[in-house]
Image: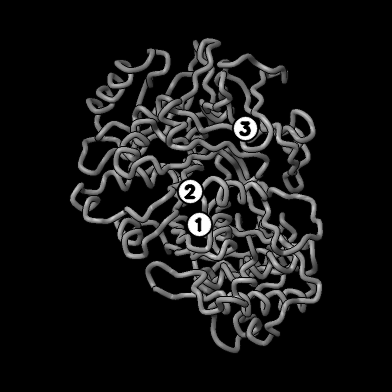
Amino acid sequence: MKHPSHTAKIAPERIAYEMASSGETLTFGELDSRSNQAAHGFRKLGVGPGENIALLFENCLDFVVLTWAAQRSGLFYTAISCHLTADEISYIVGDCAAKVLVVSSTFSEFLPAIQTACPDVRIFVSGGAEGAEQDWNAFERSMPTIPVADETVGADLLYSSGTTGRPKGVVREFTRQPIDTVIPPLMTVLCETMANMDDQSIYLSPAPLYHAAPLRTSMMAVMLGGKSIIMEQFDAGQMLQLIEKHRVTHTQVVPTMFVRMLRLPRAEREACDLSSLKVIFHAAAPCPQEIKRQMLDWVGPILIEYYAGSEANGVTVSTSEDWLKYPGTVGRSLIGEILVVDKDGKPLPVGEIGDVYFDSGIDFSYRADPEKTAKAYLRPGCSTLGDVGYVNAEGFLFLTDRASYTIISGGVNIYPQETEDLLACHPDVADVAVFGVPNEEMGEEVKAVVQLVDGIDPGPAKAEELMEFCRARLSRIKAPKSIDFREELPRTPTGKLTKRKLKDEYWN
């Protein structure tokens, strides 16, 4: 594995990045020159190794240049979701202690509020008017194209999506290392060892690059000398066309993307040649078993599922063969072992459900939140992402839900993911969330909130039909006691269901 600067020396005209819709490209030579210029720009602004910058961008080439500039100049870079409000953006910019914020001109409307909330942060606009005082592109072009003298590896400092609370930054101690280093190292194992990505790989990224998985994997593809094709936004039909057009070898999706692809007309799906695909990664959210079976029947045993988080404290991997042998598993740990413990931290026997910990020896912390950091650890090097599940005798992990979504009804623990997965497979259901709501007698009861397929009547009869659908396939305690309908459920652009927002409505 080599840094893109090495590929720039031997094949400067090779394309490193290409935007899917516009066709705009960035060669390895251009990436090397521009990332050096941006790195010099950050140094001129007084941002040194171990310090932080923040980036607010849609998927575009200017964004990837800035990430590589930070990566080769020892900076922590915080990529911010472009779907947040001005207040939420300002919170992250301040919380990560960014010295410089670079904003796409697409989001310049947020600048007055951010400048007021973060008066000490130097702010630039990318793609703005030529000659403007805060024009990042003009500033970048004025810098040298050679590497900075104190070149050292930087890393992302990403914030959680806030699905269970206010976003928190995941930080690691800064150490000077060669720029060939990729942080976190687990990505090397996943991409190079498990997926056999190399300089011939063509990686298609359909998700927002401010999210950990698409950002890190698209960077790994380029690190290995391959090509990353970046979709401006996800569209199921376009994705299939891009796979055929570019002979894509690797891609990464979340389960909601599987659902949208499977619900395309069969003729549209079968019209595209997907034979170039070697691996489809999927992660970030649980995948209903029936949806995964349909994908395996369609594309073959090329799915690799992994379980990890922005914390990069561990990873489990399940090949298609693993999953077919143990349906529902998210795989075995690649580093260290998985511990499942009770609420007192005592290890549980095989098959018993408890809190899931990575005993990997890898440490992290949540920025400015020692209490949340402490709660994540059983002991140094052994930490949790907040999920519950169990392992089988062969060490394969099965997740049942987030710990915070466990429903306790009459003293019995109910994990709503199973109910959610079942309803997601109903032909009339477009999206679904299942969680606990107050019950005077039992403490909590199971509630489902459903987004129906267009054209389906969201009346009492449909609610009763869906509840009976569950009662016929699950124990009655897991079946929803009531169902509400919404036009759309709150999901992040990366596909994560922000169930907290729904649940708060009923508890507040």
Please indicate whether residue 241 sits to the left or right of residue 151 in the image. left
Q: Would you say the residues marked 2 and 1 are in contact, meaning their CB atoms lie under 8 Å apart?
A: yes
In the displayed structure, 202 sits above or below 344; it is: below
Q: Which residue is mark 3?
A: 386
Q: Secondary structure at mark 3?
A: loop
Distance from label 3 to label 1 (Cα)?
24 Å
In the displayed structure, 262 sits above or below 291; it is: below
Residue 84 visible in this rendered orientation of the protein:
no
Q: Amino acid at mark 2?
A: Thr
- From the image, state whether disc 3 or disc 1 is nearer to you: 3
Residue 287 visible in this rendered orientation of the protein:
yes
In the displayed structure, 336 sits above or below 256; it is: above
Q: Which residue is mark 2?
A: 492
Out of 320 and 452, give the one closest to the viewer: 320
Query: What number is the disc on residue 83?
Result: 1
Q: Would you say the residues marked 3 and 1 are in contact, meaning their CB atoms lie under 8 Å apart?
A: no
Q: Earlier in the sequence, mark 2 or mark 3?
A: 3
The residue sitting at 67% across, 61% down in the picture is: 77
